[in-house]
Amino acid sequence: MAEVIFNLEGNITIIQCDINDKMKDIIDKFLIKINKKGDNLYYLYNGNRIKYDISFIEQANELDKKSKKNEYISY
């Protein structure tokens, strides 16, 4: 298991996932949990917009691969 930490306007939301889950599916879980539509949200990871079609492990940098935690900023 892995964790994706979303920070939206200072509110932290943690989504558990498998390391092979696609980012789109992880974001969908996040949006359900916060009860919002994602039409106007952007997601940053390490200062870059995330890629929806790749997996958690493909998106993660080396440090996050080891810890199995990624932190994203949503705005």
Image: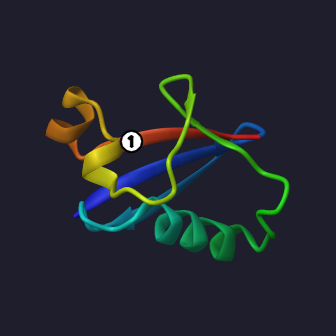
Q: Which secondary structure, mark 1?
A: strand
Disc 1 target residue: 70
Left or right of 48? Residue 68 is: left
68 vs 18: above or below: above
60 or 9: nearer the eye?
A: 60
Name the spot of residue 22 as percent of width and height, x first: 39, 65
Name the spot of residue 41 as percent of width and height, x first: 77, 51
71 or 51: nearer the eye?
A: 51
Left or right of 26? Residue 8 is: right
Left or right of 16? Residue 62 is: left
Q: The disc labelled 1 sits on which kind of residue?
A: Asn
Question: Where does the N terminus fall, quadrant-wise?
Answer: bottom left
Q: Please give the name of the residue rendered at 64% of the width and 73% of the height, measured from the top-left corner.
A: 33
46 vs 18: above or below: above
Q: Quadrant of residue 19?
A: bottom left
Q: Please give the name of the residue rendered at 48% of the width and 47% of the height, measured from the top-left corner.
A: 5
Q: Please give the name of the residue rendered at 71% of the width and 67% of the height, measured from the top-left corner.
A: 34
Q: Residue pushed farthest front? A: 53
Q: Please give the name of the residue rendered at 50% of the width and 48% of the height, measured from the top-left corner.
A: 51
